[in-house]
Image (cartoon, helix red, strand yellow):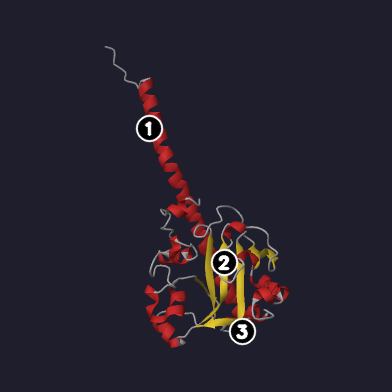
Amino acid sequence: MKKNKSAFTLAEVLVTLVIIGVVAALTVPSVQLYVRDVQYVNSLKKFYANTNQAFKLRMSKDGVTDFRRSAIIESISGTNLNSGNQSRFSNEMRKAFKTIAIFEKGQYGGNKACAYQYESGGTNNDNYTVILADGTIMRLDLTTQPQESALTMTEIRALTGHMKYLLGTIDVDVNGDNPPNKWGLDCYRFVLAQDGMIYPYMGKDYAIFKAGSGWESSQYYWNGSYDECLVEGLSCAARIMHDEWVMTYRSSKKLKSNQ
């Protein structure tokens, strides 16, 4: 007796392929975005760890516990880096970081898309720029006359903060001149404190430094009165770190358009 053999018809195969194609078209872009987001966050985490380690190591070698007394800051000839003798500062930075290139004020011509316009005029593209060995671009705007918190160190610690003096800002593009060059995706902002640590702009430490006990609802906290990360993008490092190193805001229309 012959056994009946079942098989897919050509129509069934074609329908199956169409379904697979539709599912792939819907899911592949999301997977690609997720992979990019993970890459951005991992690069951000690496930069954060390496920078803090470099500054802490330099403080140890200098025999100081206050970064204001480090050779890096003391090499700034003038009140701020952009108006001082940057060649001396460059020598100190090369001792702390593995670099590909260093550009003094206004010399770096790339990465215009990540430039941020300051209230006082000019952009971070005008700042002192360092290209690290892994291609990360770091821009520094530091001063020898830092801002000081109105709180005592005891009061700051009671709020679980760490920053008494703010020595300036450090902006980073974690994948260099490669796109998307957008704040909140591959561009982030930190501030440098007297303990040699960088803290995310508009994160908890920054907000405590600025606002004291009311920091959580202040304009200086990324999620105080509105989610600043989704408006300007400068505080997204703070949100990522708050969310345990996960980029949770990709659903924003603004960020989705900046892939």
Above or below residue 247? Residue 160 is: below
Q: Amino acid at mark 2?
A: Asp
Q: Residue at x 42, y 38 (%)?
A: 24
Q: Quadrant of residue 91?
A: bottom right
Q: Looking at the image, which residue sits at the far top?
A: 1
Name the foreground residue: 96 vs 233.
233
Q: Position of residue 181 (x, y in %)?
A: 56, 56
Q: Determine contact: label 1, label 3, CB under 8 Å.
A: no
What amino acid type should be assigned to the residue bearing mark 1?
Answer: Ile
Report the label total: 3
Residue under pointer 2: 171
- Find out whether the residues at labels 2 and 1 contact each other: C-beta distance under 8 Å: no
Marks 1 and 3, the one that precedes in the sequence: 1
Sort mark 2 into few (<14), some (14-19) or many (20+) by Cα contacts within 10 Å: many
Where does residue 30 sit, x and y in percent of width and height? 43, 46
Q: Nearer the viewer, mark 3 or mark 2?
A: 2
Quarter-of-image position of residue 18: top left
Q: Which residue was labeled with disc 1?
A: 19
User: What's the CA distance linking mark 2 and mark 1?
Assistant: 45 Å
Please indicate, yes or no, whether residue 107 appears anywhere in the rendered image: yes
Q: Is residue 220 above or below residue 22?
A: below
Residue under label 3, please give it: 69
